[in-house]
Image (spheres, helix red, strand yellow):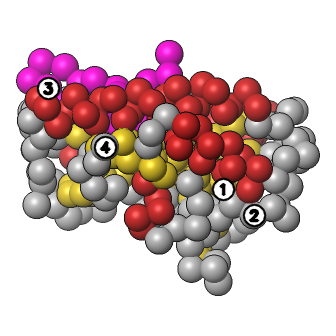
Amino acid sequence: MIRLKNEKQIAGIRESCHLLANLYKEIIPQVQAGMSTKDIDDMVVEFIVRHGGKPAWYAEGFDGAACISVNDEVIHGIPDKRRKIHNGDLVSLDIGIDLNGYISDSATTLMIGSVSPEAKKLCDVTKECLKAGIAACKAGNRIRDIADAVSKVASAAGFGIVSDFCGHGVGLSVHEDPSIPNIWLGGANPRIQPGMVLAIEPMINMGTGDVEELDDGWTIVTADGKLSCHEEHTVAIFKDHTEVLTARE
């Protein structure tokens, strides 16, 4: 069931999303080669607690405040003090905050040091996929319009599109209806309505869009071992516009 949010609820979600945007602005400049993914998670926890929130992923049973996925890891990488970041890595951060019961969700992929031209292109295209998906996310359109916009950009660049995982409704819970695929393969296609709050999150791979799950039961990796990139924003739908709640600009 799709939960349409009222003005008060959107205001609460907006506050949570703005806090998440500020978290990224503080944390991103500190992420560098030599750190462990657990070091990053510790900074995320400290920021969230300092500002009166709770890491949203804890309620999902995930062992970390941030999903930190490196290189061929698509999503749900578990923070680990033994996992070091190196020059040239792609590091995806996916973070959610529960602030007074209102949930924010946003992800971005960082290029550490000097990355290859191919890796930079993947990151640039994934950002364009997110931008296109948000542009298609407006009242009166359908969920398929978002998927078609994302897949058009990624396919034109020759990249693989992850279909096993997708965006979703968010705000009062971490994962709500509807599902928002990044490539249309059929299924439910509800109309986008004012009051929806959605997490749009392209997951784009250098090679195949196929993925596999590691034995830890969480980490999703590319089936061919090639790089992956992940970008995500939480947006709120209004009658005459769509607001990017987690925008960091």
Q: Residue at x 67, y 51 (%)?
A: 41
Query: Relative to the observer, which residue lies in front, 237 or 152?
Result: 237
Label ID, residue 238: 3
Of marks 4 and 3, which one's residue comes earlier in the chain? 4
Mark 1 → mark 2, Cα distance in angstroms: 11 Å
Q: Please say if 14 is above or below 146.
A: above
Q: Which residue is mark 1?
A: 69
Query: Relative to the observer, which residue lies in front, 234 or 144?
Result: 234
Q: Quadrant of the N terminus?
A: bottom left
SS at badge 2: loop
Q: Residues within 10 Å of mark 1 (few under 14, many from 20)?
A: many
SS at badge 4: loop
SS at badge 1: strand
User: Which callout, 1 or 4, points to the residue nearer the camera?
Assistant: 4
Mark 1 → mark 4, Cα distance in angstroms: 27 Å
Of marks 1 and 4, which one's residue comes earlier in the chain? 1
Label 4 amino acid?
Asn
Q: Is residue 168 magenta?
A: no
User: Which callout, 4 or 3, points to the residue nearer the camera?
Assistant: 4
Extent of the magenta region: 232-249
Label ID, residue 100: 4
Which of the 4 image quarters holds residue 209? Answer: bottom right
- The answer to whether residue 72 is visible is no
Q: Which residue is mark 2?
A: 80
x and y percentages locating residue 66 in the rendered image: 58, 52
x and y percentages locating residue 105 in the rendered image: 41, 44
Horizontal side of 31 relative to 6 (left or right) equals right
